[in-house]
Image: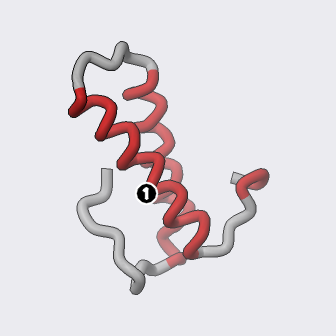
Amino acid sequence: MMDNLESNYDCADAGGDLHKLKQELAMHRGRPIENQQSQEMISRLENQISFILNKCDINHSSE
């Protein structure tokens, strides 16, 4: 997970960042949700992915 995504995010990093975030999300989704912290981690990863897709105007179908 990335620590800090801000409006000045460099979209040149989007490809690598999305790959890492999606791998981490898949890992967390593959485990049972044991507590609120687990659910919050999944939500945060999903939000980070969405932020990058929207910020960098990446078509969701071409991810």
Q: What x and y, as percent, mark residue 43? A: 39, 43
Number of callouts: 1
Residue that sits furthest to the bottom in the current view: 8
Residue under the image location 47 percent in, 47 percent down = 46
Q: Is residue 33 above or below residue 14?
A: above
Q: Is residue 54 left or right of residue 60?
A: left
Q: Nearer the viewer, residue 28 or 11?
A: 28
Q: Check disc 1: other Cα within 10 Å, few if <14, some if 14-19, many if 20+.
A: many
Q: Is residue 1 left or right of residue 57?
A: left
Q: Is residue 63 left or right of residue 28?
A: right
Residue under the image location 33 percent in, 19 percent down = 33
Residue 47 in which image quadrant: bottom left
Q: Is residue 34 above or below residue 4?
A: above
Residue under the image location 21 percent in, 33 percent down = 37
User: Label 1 is placed on what type of residue?
Assistant: Gln
Q: What x and y, as percent, mark residue 11? A: 53, 76
Q: Is residue 57 left or right of residue 36?
A: right
Q: What x and y, as percent, mark residue 35? A: 23, 22
Colour scheme shown: secondary structure
Q: What x and y, as percent, mark residue 31? A: 37, 16
Q: Nearer the viewer, residue 58 or 36?
A: 36
Residue 3 in which image quadrant: bottom left
Residue under the image location 45 percent in, 80 percent down = 10
Residue that sits furthest to the front in the current view: 36
Q: Is residue 47 above or below residue 40?
A: below
Where is mark 1, residue-wise?
Answer: 48
Mark 1 residue element: helix
